[in-house]
Image (cartoon, rainbow, N blue to C red):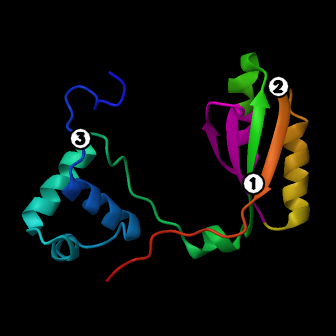
Amino acid sequence: MWGEAPRGTDRLDDTDQRLIAALRRDGRAAVSDLAGQLGLSRATVRARIERLMNRGEISGFTVLTRSDVTTAPVRGLMMLAIDGRMTEKVVSRLLGLPPVQAVHTTNGHWDLIAEIGARSLPELDETILQIRRLDGVERTETNLQLSSRRPAARF
């Protein structure tokens, strides 16, 4: 039935959700710090993280560095409508463009979303033009990212 958890897995309880939120704020937090924030033992936090990873609820940890932001300070999200037979070819070509940082498939009006990071507006403009010229790209819409907010680290 729609909305049910996949077989063999339990829904996330409140503690799992609070743990994931704490890890989103600071993915490098020490287990002892997480335990203190959540009012749990270190063993419980460690076991829950391991269980969440084994179940695929946590699929990895990542770091966003200052250079990730400063080398490509002009960012945009480009939505693309694709000729369905060309999707894999378009995705492959998009991933070959250095300013394209990620490509996401989606449903609805748009087929793909490309995250673009450029050093300048002219570089972003040139990347947009390159993408629009790709065989299989039917329509696009690009939005500039003006600012990004992430959960603040709590210490």
**Which secondary structure, mark 2?**
loop
Three-letter residue code for mark 1: Pro
Residue 15 placement (x, y as % from top left): 20, 58
Region of the chain picked out in magenta, as a range: 91-118
Q: Earlier in the sequence, mark 2 or mark 3?
A: 3
Q: Which residue is mark 1?
A: 99
Residue at the bottom extreme, as displayed: 155
Which part of the image, by quadrant, shows the N terminus?
top left
Three-letter residue code for mark 2: Gly
Residue 71, by quadrant, is bottom right
Which part of the image, by quadrant, shows the C terminus?
bottom left
Mark nearest the camera among 3 and 1 is 3
Q: Residue at x 74, y 39 (%)?
A: 94
Q: Which residue is mark 3?
A: 11
Marks 2 & 3, CB-CB < 8 Å contact: no
Q: Can you say whether 116 is above or below 83 in the image?
A: below
Q: CA distance from mark 2 to mark 3?
A: 40 Å
Residue 24, by quadrant, is bottom left
Magenta-colored stretch includes residue 67:
no
Mark nearest the camera among 2 and 1 is 2
How would you rate the neighbour count of disc 3 (Cα within 10 Å): few for under 14, some for 14-19, many for 20 or more? Answer: few
Q: Which residue is mark 2?
A: 136
**Which secondary structure, mark 1?**
loop
Marks 2 & 1, CB-CB < 8 Å contact: no
Residue 124 placement (x, y as % from top left): 84, 58
Q: CA distance from mark 2 to mark 1?
A: 20 Å
Task: Judge by depth and name the residue closer to the eye, 155 or 13.
Answer: 13
Q: Can you say whether 55 is above or below 76 in the image?
A: above
Q: Earlier in the sequence, mark 2 or mark 1?
A: 1
Residue 51 placement (x, y as % from top left): 19, 47
